[in-house]
Image (spheres, rainbow, N blue to C red):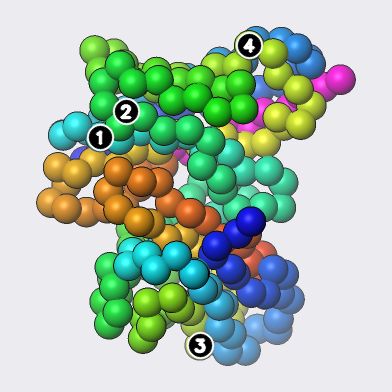
Amino acid sequence: EADIYQTPRYLVIGTGKKITLECSQTMGHDKMYWYQQDPGMELHLIHYSYGVNSTEKGDLSSESTVSRIRTEHFPLTLESARPSHTSQYLCASRQGAYYGYTFGSGTRLTVV
Amino acid sequence: GDSVTQMEGPVTLSEEAFLTINCTYTATGYPSLFWYVQYPGEGLQLLLKATKADDKGSNKGFEATYRKETTSFHLEKGSVQVSDSAVYFCALSDLAQGGSEKLVFGKGTKLTVNP
Protein backbone atom coordinates (compact mmCIF):
# COMPACT_ATOMS: atom_id res chain seq x y z
CA GLU A 1 0.00 0.00 0.00
CA ALA A 2 1.57 3.23 -1.19
CA ASP A 3 1.85 6.13 1.23
CA ILE A 4 3.30 8.42 -1.39
CA TYR A 5 1.30 9.20 -4.49
CA GLN A 6 2.32 10.54 -7.84
CA THR A 7 -0.01 11.74 -10.57
CA PRO A 8 -0.31 11.32 -13.42
CA ARG A 9 1.34 7.91 -13.99
CA TYR A 10 1.77 8.62 -17.69
CA LEU A 11 1.72 11.92 -19.57
CA VAL A 12 2.21 12.72 -23.23
CA ILE A 13 2.38 16.43 -23.94
CA GLY A 14 3.39 18.77 -26.71
CA THR A 15 6.50 20.93 -26.77
CA GLY A 16 6.11 24.29 -25.05
CA LYS A 17 3.34 23.24 -22.70
CA LYS A 18 3.47 23.94 -18.97
CA ILE A 19 3.08 20.87 -16.79
CA THR A 20 2.99 20.06 -13.08
CA LEU A 21 3.79 16.63 -11.72
CA GLU A 22 2.07 16.01 -8.42
CA CYS A 23 3.56 14.25 -5.40
CA SER A 24 1.82 13.80 -2.06
CA GLN A 25 2.66 11.74 1.01
CA THR A 26 0.57 10.90 4.05
CA MET A 27 3.40 9.93 6.41
CA GLY A 28 4.25 13.39 7.73
CA HIS A 29 7.83 13.16 6.45
CA ASP A 30 9.73 16.44 6.36
CA LYS A 31 12.26 15.36 3.73
CA MET A 32 11.16 14.92 0.15
CA TYR A 33 13.06 14.36 -3.10
CA TRP A 34 12.61 14.35 -6.87
CA TYR A 35 14.70 12.04 -9.08
CA GLN A 36 14.93 11.82 -12.84
CA GLN A 37 15.57 8.33 -14.13
CA ASP A 38 17.12 7.96 -17.56
CA PRO A 39 16.51 5.00 -19.89
CA GLY A 40 19.75 3.46 -18.68
CA MET A 41 18.12 3.24 -15.23
CA GLU A 42 20.50 5.62 -13.43
CA LEU A 43 18.87 7.93 -10.90
CA HIS A 44 19.68 11.65 -10.82
CA LEU A 45 18.62 13.87 -7.93
CA ILE A 46 17.10 17.08 -9.31
CA HIS A 47 15.39 18.69 -6.27
CA TYR A 48 14.93 18.12 -2.56
CA SER A 49 13.26 19.72 0.42
CA TYR A 50 13.90 19.46 4.15
CA GLY A 51 10.53 20.92 5.09
CA VAL A 52 7.95 23.59 4.42
CA ASN A 53 9.38 26.56 2.47
CA SER A 54 12.69 24.69 1.99
CA THR A 55 13.78 23.69 -1.52
CA GLU A 56 17.23 22.93 -2.92
CA LYS A 57 18.59 21.99 -6.32
CA GLY A 58 20.02 18.53 -6.64
CA ASP A 59 23.09 17.09 -8.29
CA LEU A 60 21.69 17.21 -11.82
CA SER A 61 20.84 20.58 -13.30
CA SER A 62 17.18 20.73 -14.23
CA GLU A 63 14.94 23.34 -15.84
CA SER A 64 12.12 22.29 -13.55
CA THR A 65 11.09 24.06 -10.35
CA VAL A 66 9.52 22.82 -7.12
CA SER A 67 7.58 24.25 -4.22
CA ARG A 68 6.85 23.06 -0.67
CA ILE A 69 3.97 25.02 0.81
CA ARG A 70 2.58 22.07 2.76
CA THR A 71 4.44 19.18 4.37
CA GLU A 72 2.54 16.57 2.41
CA HIS A 73 2.79 18.15 -1.04
CA PHE A 74 5.89 18.57 -3.26
CA PRO A 75 4.91 19.36 -6.87
CA LEU A 76 7.37 19.71 -9.74
CA THR A 77 6.70 22.16 -12.57
CA LEU A 78 8.10 22.50 -16.08
CA GLU A 79 7.23 25.93 -17.52
CA SER A 80 7.91 24.93 -21.12
CA ALA A 81 8.28 21.23 -21.86
CA ARG A 82 10.84 20.05 -24.41
CA PRO A 83 11.59 16.60 -25.88
CA SER A 84 14.77 16.51 -23.77
CA HIS A 85 12.52 16.41 -20.68
CA THR A 86 11.18 13.01 -21.70
CA SER A 87 11.98 10.74 -18.77
CA GLN A 88 10.62 8.98 -15.72
CA TYR A 89 10.27 11.22 -12.65
CA LEU A 90 10.30 9.64 -9.21
CA CYS A 91 9.26 11.32 -5.98
CA ALA A 92 10.42 10.07 -2.58
CA SER A 93 10.18 10.97 1.09
CA ARG A 94 12.16 9.99 4.15
CA GLN A 95 11.49 9.68 7.87
CA GLY A 96 15.06 10.22 9.03
CA ALA A 97 18.73 9.47 8.53
CA TYR A 98 18.58 5.77 9.45
CA TYR A 99 15.61 5.12 7.24
CA GLY A 100 15.51 4.63 3.53
CA TYR A 101 13.34 6.49 1.09
CA THR A 102 9.74 5.65 0.34
CA PHE A 103 9.17 6.10 -3.39
CA GLY A 104 6.08 6.86 -5.38
CA SER A 105 5.23 4.84 -8.49
CA GLY A 106 6.64 7.50 -10.78
CA THR A 107 5.41 9.64 -13.66
CA ARG A 108 6.55 8.69 -17.14
CA LEU A 109 6.64 11.91 -19.16
CA THR A 110 6.87 12.01 -22.95
CA VAL A 111 7.23 15.36 -24.70
CA VAL A 112 6.49 15.26 -28.42
CA GLY B 1 32.53 12.40 -1.94
CA ASP B 2 30.54 9.30 -1.19
CA SER B 3 29.96 6.80 -3.97
CA VAL B 4 28.46 3.38 -4.66
CA THR B 5 29.72 0.95 -7.28
CA GLN B 6 27.66 -2.06 -8.20
CA MET B 7 28.26 -4.73 -10.78
CA GLU B 8 27.15 -3.89 -14.26
CA GLY B 9 24.42 -5.90 -15.82
CA PRO B 10 22.44 -7.19 -17.29
CA VAL B 11 22.47 -10.42 -15.33
CA THR B 12 20.55 -13.38 -16.75
CA LEU B 13 19.93 -16.49 -14.68
CA SER B 14 17.83 -19.60 -14.83
CA GLU B 15 15.16 -20.20 -12.22
CA GLU B 16 16.54 -21.64 -8.94
CA ALA B 17 20.06 -20.36 -9.65
CA PHE B 18 22.13 -18.59 -7.00
CA LEU B 19 22.30 -14.80 -7.26
CA THR B 20 25.05 -12.43 -6.22
CA ILE B 21 25.06 -8.74 -7.10
CA ASN B 22 28.22 -7.03 -5.91
CA CYS B 23 28.15 -3.60 -4.28
CA THR B 24 31.06 -1.65 -2.84
CA TYR B 25 31.02 1.83 -1.38
CA THR B 26 33.18 4.79 -0.46
CA ALA B 27 32.12 6.94 2.47
CA THR B 28 33.79 9.34 4.87
CA GLY B 29 31.69 8.37 7.87
CA TYR B 30 29.65 5.38 8.98
CA PRO B 31 26.96 4.96 6.40
CA SER B 32 23.72 3.08 6.46
CA LEU B 33 23.39 0.76 3.46
CA PHE B 34 20.32 -0.18 1.44
CA TRP B 35 19.17 -2.37 -1.42
CA TYR B 36 16.20 -1.25 -3.50
CA VAL B 37 14.28 -3.17 -6.15
CA GLN B 38 12.41 -1.67 -9.11
CA TYR B 39 9.92 -3.84 -10.97
CA PRO B 40 8.98 -2.87 -14.53
CA GLY B 41 6.91 0.28 -14.69
CA GLU B 42 7.13 0.91 -10.96
CA GLY B 43 8.98 3.08 -8.49
CA LEU B 44 11.71 1.76 -6.20
CA GLN B 45 10.89 -0.37 -3.16
CA LEU B 46 13.15 -0.85 -0.18
CA LEU B 47 14.31 -4.48 -0.18
CA LEU B 48 16.60 -4.54 2.86
CA LYS B 49 18.95 -2.37 4.88
CA ALA B 50 21.81 -2.47 7.40
CA THR B 51 22.83 0.39 9.64
CA LYS B 52 26.13 -0.76 11.15
CA ALA B 53 29.06 -3.05 10.47
CA ASP B 54 28.35 -6.81 10.49
CA ASP B 55 24.60 -6.23 10.37
CA LYS B 56 22.76 -8.55 7.99
CA GLY B 57 19.68 -7.28 6.22
CA SER B 58 17.22 -9.83 4.87
CA ASN B 59 13.86 -9.88 3.14
CA LYS B 60 12.00 -12.18 0.71
CA GLY B 61 14.92 -14.62 0.65
CA PHE B 62 17.45 -11.90 -0.18
CA GLU B 63 20.36 -11.17 2.16
CA ALA B 64 23.21 -8.68 2.38
CA THR B 65 25.86 -8.24 5.07
CA TYR B 66 27.48 -4.90 5.89
CA ARG B 67 31.25 -5.58 5.62
CA LYS B 68 33.20 -2.57 6.83
CA GLU B 69 36.60 -4.19 6.25
CA THR B 70 35.89 -4.68 2.55
CA THR B 71 33.44 -1.74 2.23
CA SER B 72 30.93 -4.07 0.63
CA PHE B 73 27.23 -4.90 0.80
CA HIS B 74 26.70 -7.70 -1.71
CA LEU B 75 23.16 -8.89 -2.39
CA GLU B 76 22.55 -12.66 -2.43
CA LYS B 77 19.67 -15.05 -2.92
CA GLY B 78 19.96 -18.79 -2.86
CA SER B 79 17.29 -19.63 -5.43
CA VAL B 80 15.88 -16.97 -7.74
CA GLN B 81 12.42 -17.02 -9.26
CA VAL B 82 11.05 -15.51 -12.44
CA SER B 83 9.24 -12.95 -10.27
CA ASP B 84 12.62 -11.63 -9.06
CA SER B 85 13.26 -10.15 -12.51
CA ALA B 86 13.78 -6.45 -11.82
CA VAL B 87 16.42 -3.75 -11.47
CA TYR B 88 18.34 -3.71 -8.18
CA PHE B 89 19.96 -0.60 -6.72
CA CYS B 90 22.52 -0.40 -3.94
CA ALA B 91 22.52 2.86 -1.94
CA LEU B 92 24.13 4.51 1.07
CA SER B 93 23.31 7.29 3.50
CA ASP B 94 26.24 8.93 5.24
CA LEU B 95 25.47 11.02 8.29
CA ALA B 96 29.00 12.44 8.23
CA GLN B 97 28.16 14.47 5.13
CA GLY B 98 27.22 17.59 7.09
CA GLY B 99 23.78 16.30 7.92
CA SER B 100 22.88 15.74 4.30
CA GLU B 101 20.25 13.04 4.13
CA LYS B 102 20.37 12.31 0.45
CA LEU B 103 20.83 8.71 -0.56
CA VAL B 104 23.68 7.97 -2.93
CA PHE B 105 22.65 5.30 -5.45
CA GLY B 106 24.58 2.90 -7.61
CA LYS B 107 23.72 2.74 -11.30
CA GLY B 108 21.46 -0.29 -10.98
CA THR B 109 21.76 -3.92 -12.09
CA LYS B 110 19.09 -5.45 -14.27
CA LEU B 111 18.27 -9.07 -13.43
CA THR B 112 16.35 -11.36 -15.75
CA VAL B 113 15.35 -14.82 -14.55
CA ASN B 114 14.29 -17.32 -17.18
CA PRO B 115 11.98 -20.28 -16.45
Magenta highlight range: B106-115
**Residue that mark 1 sits on:** B31
**Marked residue nearer the N-terminal end (4 or 1):** 1
Q: Label 1 marks which chain's residue?
A: B
Give A18 or B62, whichever is nearer the viewer.
B62
2 or 1: mark nearer the eye: 1
Horizontal and vertical percent for residue A102? Answer: 48, 54
**Marked residue nearer the N-terminal end (4 or 2):** 2
Which dot marks residue A79?
3
Q: CA distance from mark 2 to mark 1?
A: 9 Å
**Residue that mark 4 sits on:** B78
Please say if the residues under marks 3 and 2 sit with CB atoms less than 8 Å apart: no
Q: CA distance from mark 4 to mark 2?
A: 23 Å
**Residue that mark 2 sits on:** B25
Height in image: A1 above or below A4?
above
Please say if the residues under marks 2 and 1 sit with CB atoms less than 8 Å apart: yes
The amino acid sitting under disc 2 is Tyr
The amino acid sitting under disc 3 is Glu
Q: Residue at x 49, y 69 (%)?
A: A25
Q: Residue at x 62, y 37 (%)?
A: B87
